[in-house]
Amino acid sequence: MKAAVLTQLGTVPVYAEFADPQPKNENEIVIDVKAASVKNLDKLRASGKHYASYTELPTVVGFDGVGTLADGTLVYAQGITGMLAEKALISKGKYLVLPPNIDVATAAALPNAVIGSAMALVFRAKIRQGAVVLINGATGVTGQVAVQLAKHYGASKVIATGRNADSLEKLLSLGADEIVSLQNEDTVIVEKLKAIQQQNPIDIVIDYIWGHSVELLLQALKGKGGYTHPVKIVTVGSISGEEIVLRSDVLRSTAIEILGSGIGSLSENEMKLFIEEVVPETFELAANGKLTIETVVAPLSEVNDYWNKPIDAGKRLVIGVG
């Protein structure tokens, strides 16, 4: 079969011939792969910088993807073997059957973005009908999905922040009610956030960038003595830096709860619900045009050209296979 083959950690996978995967037991089945996305996780594993980097080379890369079972059923699954290939092994029964009308590139790209958005909104922030939600750093793929899901889960108002002006404007068509540019001077950002807080107190912040913008947000939310509106800040990413200055008086004067969202922050039951209920629901939303994600689709034969090619932050690279 043809596949994206990694021969050495730190190099780019190449389009090459590779042996078809063979099930080792009755719990492993073969699927014909249709599409698989290329995510930071895939690149980190191939680079050798991830704790789950490949230990046996050469190997086929690709963590998850979309393909068909022997009977033609379209499914999403995580691979036992690499998914950037014409065929892959998956675990029997550990797959999600996809709506028949869903776009395969969308189906391949969506789960990773849902992990970074729905988990934070549903399980960590525990979003409720009518909540006011601020998405900090919303212009990337996951932030765009978070804006849409916040509205789907009943948010009465969604505020989105980011640096890219065009991407911020686009968020207004995806459900954001108000946008705040992080390109502004610090004082302008703080005053804008204070004005929002006074008009419609923020219940939830889903943060994708951490760093200085969160410090500005904390300035805007800080109390002055007396009652303050409770707000949960859920951090999902840290592209602006891993550290912030967090003053004790901010926490003492404000009803702020700071949480993180990731696999390690969920209980076993929450993870089960995420896989069995949340992800399938988002596939249905996408199939019905109620949840969108932009993709750049490249053929498997060009995987080595696209692997490190710059892709717009608001789009996900998907490799089309079958």
Image (tube, rainbow, N blue to C red):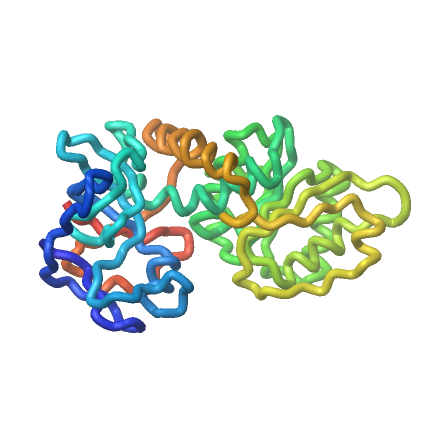
Q: Which residue lies furthest to the right in this view?
A: 225
Q: Is residue 283 above or below residue 187?
A: above
- x, y percent for residue 256: 74, 46
Q: Which residue is drawn at 74% across and 53% down?
A: 191
176 or 284, which lies in front?
A: 284
Q: Residue 43, located in which quarter of the rendered image?
A: bottom left
Front position in the image: 58 or 2: 58
Residue 223 visible:
yes
Give the quarter of the image for residue 123: top right
Can you tell which quarter of the image residue 176 is in? Answer: top right
Determine whether, in the image, residue 61 is placed left or right of residue 52: left
In this rendered view, identify the residue nearer to me: 164 or 289: 289
Quadrant where the image shows the N terminus: bottom left
Q: Is residue 43 above or below residue 10?
A: above
Image point (37%, 51%), residue name: 315
Left or right, 45 with reference to 152: left
Q: Picture coordinates of residue 25 (x, y %)?
A: 19, 43
Q: In this view, does 25 lie above or below 186?
A: above
Can residue 309 be seen here? The reply is: no
Give the quadrant of the C terminus.
top left
Residue 78 locus on image (x, y percent): 31, 45
Task: Locate residue 19 relative to residue 269 in the image: left or right.
Answer: left
Q: In this view, does 111 lie to the left or right of 299?
A: right
Q: Residue at x 84, y 57 (%)?
A: 249
Instruction: Please say if 11 is above or below 140.
Output: below
Seen at 56% across and 47% down, the residue is 265
Work out which residue is located at the far front of the displayed protein and give it: 25
